Amino acid sequence: MPDTAVKDAANLVIRPIARADLPGLLALYQHLNTEDPVLEQQLAESRFAEILAHPGMTIFAALDGKLAVSSVTLIIIPNLTRGGAPYALIENVVTHADYRQRGLAGAVIRRAIESAWEKGCYKVMLLTGSKDPATLRFYANCGFTQDKTGFQVRRPA
């Protein structure tokens, strides 16, 4: 979907999540795994503090005003192969049910990949448990190829 599709929401911004965004992020995650239990507030705050302090870990989100409507987690991993170039992993791709089919997840994934390239990563990997052909096509349209057990995208030369 073209980037113009993302402009549906007037106040839409894609940026790394900050401490004040935790309640909205937790609400958004209910759209990822609906069967997951709601985290106790103290545990959620503790885990979120760890995420924010973890070098190389960023949660990017599309926000409509203060509402988190789509997000991905990017983890950049130091490496001793490939000339020391790090690699990255994308996890927890989710879009709020009311905001799907607007290009938001693709825009947030592209922002995460751009960040990985800026950090010198040589590839970005993404795994999905989905067998839905539309989901697999979506990841392929984001630039991922399924040439191993999981998906990956390599940094352009």
Image (spheres, grey):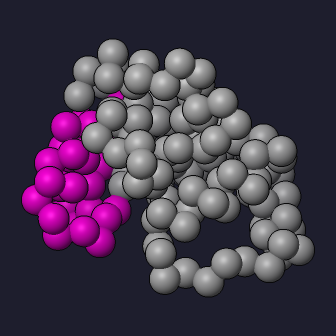
Reply above or below: 34 against 126.
below
Q: Position of residue 75 (x, y in %)?
A: 57, 51
Range shown magenta: 127-155
The answer to whether residue 41 is seen in the rendering is yes
Q: Residue at x 58, y 40 (%)?
A: 61
Q: Closest to the observer: 3 or 122?
A: 3
**Count of numbered circles on the image:** 0
Residue under the image location 33 percent in, 34 percent down: 102
Vertical order, 131 against 26 (above or below): below
Quadrant of the drawing holding the N terminus? top left
Residue 76 in sight here? no
Which quarter of the image is occupied by the C terminus? top left
Rendered location of residue 52, percent (x, y)? 79, 50
Relative depth, front residue between 54 and 19? 19
Answer above or below: position of 62 versus 135.
above
Across and down, in percent, residue 113 comes to 44, 34
Q: Is residue 46 magenta?
A: no
Q: Residue at x 83, y 46 (%)?
A: 19
The vertical placement of 140 against 147, above or below, is: above
Q: Residue at x 42, y 48 (%)?
A: 98
Question: Is residue 93 rendered to the left or right of residue 51?
Answer: left
53 relative position to 88: left or right: right
